[in-house]
Amino acid sequence: MRNIRSVGAALSLSLAAALAACAPSLSGPKLDSDPNTPSSATPNQLLSSVQANGNILLNGPAARLVSMWVQQMSGTDRQYQSLGIYQGLTESNYDVPWQAVYTGGGLVDIRNIQNAARASGDKTYLGIAEVWEAIFIGTAADFWGDVPYSDVIAGSTTPKLDKQADVYAAVQKVLDAAIADLGAGTGVGPGVVDLVYGGDRAKWIAAAHTLKARYYLHTAKGNAAAYASALAEANQGVKTSGGNFYTWAADLAGQQNLWNQFYRERDSYMRAGKWLVDLLKVRNDPRLQQYFGTNNAGGYGGAAPGQNLDGNVHSWLSDTRGSAGFRQPFITSADNNLIIAEAQYRTGSTTAALATLNAERQAAGLAVLPGTTTGTALLTAILDEKYIAQFQMIEAYNDWRRTCYPNLTPASNVFGGNIPARFVYASSEITANPNIPAIGAQPSRNTLDSPVASTSADGTACKGQK
């Protein structure tokens, strides 16, 4: 693992993007920096790099790809038209998110921040860095399942893969440590260098609880008890919009919203997904105008997978959502509260689940559902609300894999008539690390996403997981 980082104090998304694009493998021939070796850069400089890299991980190529797979967006030109129907996917498509996790600006710099914070006794800074570690490694487990973690921390140049369940369990412990360290109330932390919460310990603690709830949900497919754990954590999570976690963006050179940057460079490649646009229209949901702009004909429309761009039909993002300074959400009160609603339903508290759902519907500008909404109708109403609230968030893909809802029709037969269920290991790591299996030896699904969801949450046969 080579440590490539920005040592400038100012955050530069363009620099971080360049680093992620050209960073070497996690498993280089020499280890010139590891997560346990102190850095000569200051914690504030390292945190700037981590925040920029986190933006790439959460809002860059991976987010665009899964937004097409869950049909919130659609590829309408060139390689994105192909990627949206699962064609042309190779291991190189996953290099950027992989390198974002493990190289400079990722786990390397996060561990160096933690070491410096421990040395100075700054538990506020330590706790924030621990939450970032959980985000990076938890996201890796989401995408790839079994990933390097314990060996990376130990400094191995060819780290083995830890089991997905073990990684999630370790991430839960990291978040527990973060909550304890932030709760200690000691140390000055990063202050304004923290572009998420400005060093606010209470907000970071709430975000950590929401992350714990999410990661419990990611294990719930084969462990129904995880819903009770998710409920307990989400009840301590981000409950109001004032605690939302937004990644950084500004209308400044190199710091623009990554979706805005993508559109300016490849304006024909993506448009709104037909499934989501049609759902918003049927519901008369005000988020149609919040999420999307009008097409050339003055209306709203989405592209089905594989369709060519039609400017008279297909919408791009709204002026707000697609602006250079729009800060993309990663954790929101809406998503947290809908975790509560689903977990209440799954644990038998259906009356409470309906009340929680209706509170979120009202917050979104929708009418409440009647008290007669029960059973499958209640569950799918919760999941519909989650799918909409998670627009452009990778969590929509995690929910779909767990529930097969919405019950999307696969865009092609390339994956045996299935929607892709996991990321392939990055080409750079396959080449350098003998512990990474070759493409043909990799599973089609991650362990905790198995077995396939033969039935969707709406009770029908699952179309995309066979």
Image: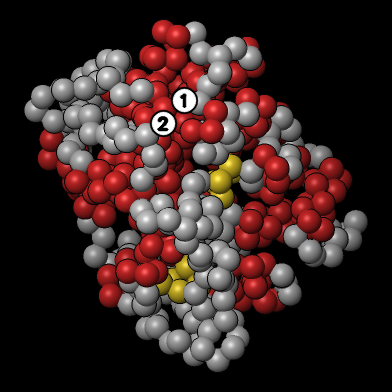
Q: Nearer the viewer, residue 289 or 134?
A: 289
Q: Position of residue 167 (x, y in %)?
A: 42, 27
Identity, as a three-letter code, of the amino acid under mark 1: Ala
Residue pictured at 32% horizontal, 40% vertical: 100
Q: Nearer the viewer, residue 45 or 315?
A: 45
Residue pictured at 20% horizontal, 41% vertical: 23
Q: Position of residue 248 (x, y in %)?
A: 49, 47
Query: Could you tell me which secondary element the residue under label 1 belongs to?
Result: helix
Q: Nearer the viewer, residue 407 or 5?
A: 5
Question: Answer yes or no: do the residues labelled 2 and 1 have beta carbons within 8 Å?
Answer: yes
Asked if residue 446 is positioned above or below residue 226 in the image, the reply reads below
226 lies left or right of 451: right
User: Which quadrant: the C terminus?
Assistant: bottom left
Task: Single out the residue that lies furthest toward the right.
Answer: 371
- The number of callouts visible is 2
Identity, as a three-letter code, of the amino acid under mark 2: Leu
Q: Which residue is mark 1?
A: 129
Q: Which mark is residue 270?
A: none
Q: Which residue is mark 2?
A: 47
Q: Earlier in the sequence, mark 2 or mark 1?
A: 2
132 lies left or right of 200: left
279 lies left or right of 359: left
User: Which quadrant: the N terminus?
Assistant: top left
